[in-house]
Amino acid sequence: MQIDFLKMKFSNTLIYWYLQNDRDLPWRKTKNPYFIWLSEIMLQQTRVAQGLAYYLKFTETFSTVFDLAKADESTVLKMWQGLGYYSRARNLHFSAKHIANELNGEFPKTYSEIIKLKGIGDYTASAIASICFNEPTAVVDGNVYRVLSRYFGIHTPINSSAGIKEFKTLAQSLIDPSQPGNFNQAIMDFGALLCKPQNPLCDTCPLSDSCVALEKKIIKELPVKEKKIKVRKRFFNYLVIKTENNTTFIEERTSKGIWQGLYQFPFIETNSNIDQKELINTEEFKKLFINETTISLFNKKVIVHKLSHQHINTQFWVVKTEKHQFATTSWKKIKEFPVPVLIANFLEEYLQKSN
């Protein structure tokens, strides 16, 4: 009986709070599944403040799914540059082509059909189905895990198979079938604005009088996560070629894994940070440079670029040489290529100092 009361109080309070505090965001003013889809994909692993500018740029450039489908992948990746997790952009583009070419531009209308699209999982399919098509399918993301685990006092690890199932079932039992879109957006906003990871605003929370975590003083303990995957340390030495004709060598990263489809300078991966002498003695360097070279280390301090499961310790070596067989790209065009943030930041600083 107590749990049923808590559930009813939770849902009603949450939606009332949301209707009073709805954020003024462009994707909140439409039910067009294409725009909702774009916003949901962009906001995965990305704060609203950062994603907003990208959303506006994307919707202006690709105002329909046909426009996105017609673009080449390199253009899409260039526009995505800075958002990270680039597989999102590649999957978005792939699914846009599928919708435009195979479905005549008609976005799927049910959860079971939406989830078949490449790059769409349970969370995104639930969000689109509920917001655009009023299907009562509950979203579960980081915000939702946090709100539910604290309010109901759940210690099941959120990244365990048991936890994923338990929280989805609970969220589904809470959703208001008469306004599923509002409920889903309410719980996501609630987690982002009030029930924050650090320093939640418990003093102004409308659910504080019935929150288990607050009552038991275990807010900081929830949600529970099983031990993280060990972070891998990597060491990249980028070779930034500059010829007398002001050309360089930049290539597409075709291998699976991080930054697929983006462009990079050739690099040598080592087991630790190395100095110039060690660099020129590597087999890769000897194979790449036949002519005489002048080498200088651009960043005096190693740059550590942190990704979810790997930390990349980076050194940029500027290699000046008379000519190079692969250096066919003019430095004047270098900023046209989609590159990882790591390289974009280097280029910004390097080009500034070169001018």
Image (cartoon, grey):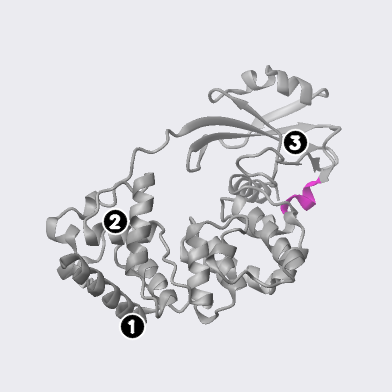
Looking at the image, is mark 1 or mark 2 nearer the viewer? 1
| Secondary structure state at the residue bearing disc 1 | helix
Q: Earlier in the sequence, mark 1 or mark 2?
A: 1
| Secondary structure state at the residue bearing disc 2 | loop
Q: Give the image location of residue 109, x and y in percent.
A: 59, 72
Viewer-proximal residue, 201 or 209? 209
* Magenta part of the chain: 330-335
| Secondary structure state at the residue bearing disc 3 | strand
Say if the magenta span includes residue 296. Answer: no
Q: Could you tell me how far apart the alpha carbons at marks 1 and 2 are, in whole angstroms?
A: 24 Å
Viewer-proximal residue, 5 or 132? 5
Say if the magenta span includes residue 331. Answer: yes
Q: Give the image location of residue 175, x and y in percent.
A: 36, 71
- Please give the name of the residue rendered at 67% of the width and 48% of the height, measured from the top-left corner: 339
Vertically, is 85 above or below 189? above
Q: Is residue 75 found left or right of 115 in the rendered image? A: right
Q: Could you tell me how far apart the alpha carbons at marks 3 and 2 are, in whole angstroms?
A: 45 Å
Q: Is residue 158 found left or right of 130 in the rendered image? A: left
Q: Earlier in the sequence, mark 3 or mark 2?
A: 2
Using the rendered view, name the quadrant where residue 230 is placed: top left
* Label 1 Cα crowd, 10 Å radius (few <14 / some 14-19 / many 20+): few
Using the rendered view, name the quadrant where residue 36 is placed: bottom right
- Please give the name of the residue rendered at 36% of the width and 75% of the height, measured from the top-left corner: 176
Q: Is residue 186 found left or right of 92 in the rendered image? A: left
Q: Amino acid at mark 1?
A: Gln
Q: Earlier in the sequence, mark 1 or mark 3?
A: 1
Vertically, is 57 above or below 305? below
Q: Report the residue marked by disc 3.
A: 241
Q: Report the residue marked by disc 2.
A: 198
Q: Report the residue marked by disc 1.
A: 20
Q: Amino acid at mark 2?
A: Gln
